[in-house]
Image (cartoon, helix red, strand yellow):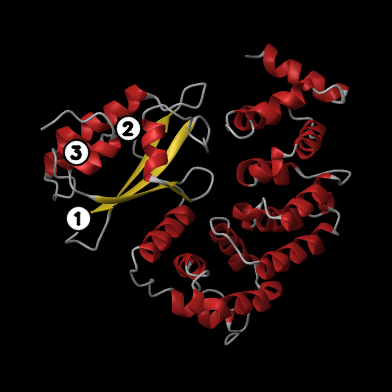
Amino acid sequence: MNTIDTISQLLQSSNSQYRLYDVGRKIAKISKEQFEKIEQNQIPYPTPSQGHACIAIAFWQKQSPHPYLWLLKLPLDERGLLNQGARNHFIAIIVEALGSDLTQDANEQQEELLKSNPYLFTPAQYKLAALNSKIKFELKQPASEYLPPFLSYLSAKTPWDNWQGVGVQGISDFVARINEDAKETSYDLLIAALPHLPNEVLFPLCGALENEPLPVALLDALIALFKQNLATKTSENEDIVQVQQHLLRSLASNCQHPHIEKLISLLLQQQSVAAELLITLSGRCWLALQDKDNLMAFFEHLVACEDQALFNSIFKDLVAIPALRPIVFQCMRAPERSEVLSKAIGQLFSQT
């Protein structure tokens, strides 16, 4: 067997068809060309999560319609480049266990080798549901049996509080298919239902919506719901903050849309912003913080939380994102930064 230097080569040498997804912050496709550049350390990983690249690889043989799935968590260095030693170690374990046939049925010894792979991880269940839906949709496979009950529920054929028959997988299947041309009525169905959904349905729905580009009409409906909740004093009602947090998540893949940029600017102009919303902004809507004014306002709200550990954690998380790194440094040096922000930055670097 020829020397295998990269995961891309490993997949290609086994004659596998494959697709790659980032599953760290949210679920987003990674092109094969981009992944090859990441593996060769030509570019930093674009969406690091706590110093790691979290990657899902779905692969299959042409004669088999059912893909295998690897869920990898590979460490990055301080520049955001892939740790080559960890990647090579992952490949060595796979080759030792399976050789060149990645889709073979593993025996007991091989299973033990695969299970001992330290780079495999299990994401949260809602992410697995969304990933499963996305892969099935892209491979033109049918949705799960949980989709029809959710469609029936959205159609208000049962009372809104009768949500117990709704499954997260059905919600994920619905959202993964929401941009189909033949499903334009799905937007209308969801928009009409939004104001009535109990949190038990709204929250997993928002978790699925965060991975998809959405039409303007649906974005505006989600924005309207967010503003309706924003009018309530968040400090007095934790439930309202939780609803806002999930609605903000639902906008994640659209946060560079002008309507969303305007909403986030409005949010950051508030006298105070709950820490939970700041965490959601940095974790899901980080692209909206590429605007320096937004990022400065974000940091000022963050120091107002008076939690140095939270400030340190979010600052380190944002500065690791290649698209944000230069803007974070601009904010660090900005003459208009408050004394409190300057002090927090000073404490951060005194502890490193």
Q: Quadrant of the C terminus?
A: top right
Contact between marks 1 and 2 (CB within 8 A): the answer is: no
Which class describes the residues within 10 Å of circle 2: few (<14), some (14-19), or many (20+)?
some
Label 1 crowding class (10 Å Cα cut-off): few <14, some 14-19, many 20+?
A: some
- Type of amino acid at the residue the image marks with label 1: Gln
- Compare residues 310 and 186 and report the one nearer the observer: 186
Alpha-carbon span between mark 3 and mark 2: 12 Å
Where disc 2 sits, the SS reads: loop
Is residue 149 shown to the viewer in this render?
yes
Residue at 41%, 46% (x, y): give it. Answer: 31
Image label count: 3
Q: What whole-number distance in Å separates the C-alpha atoms at marks 1 and 3? A: 23 Å
| Residue farthest along the bottom direction in this orientation | 157
Question: What residue is disc 1 on?
Answer: 61
Which residue is identified by label 3? Answer: 112
Q: Position of residue 241 (x, y in %)?
A: 74, 53
Disc 2 marks a residue whose amino acid type is Pro
Left or right position of 141 against 184: left
**Pointer 1 or 2: first along the chain:** 1
Q: Secondary structure at mark 1?
A: loop
Q: Residue at x 35, y 24 (%)?
A: 84
Q: Nearer the viewer, residue 99 or 154?
A: 99
Identify residue type, mark 3.
Glu
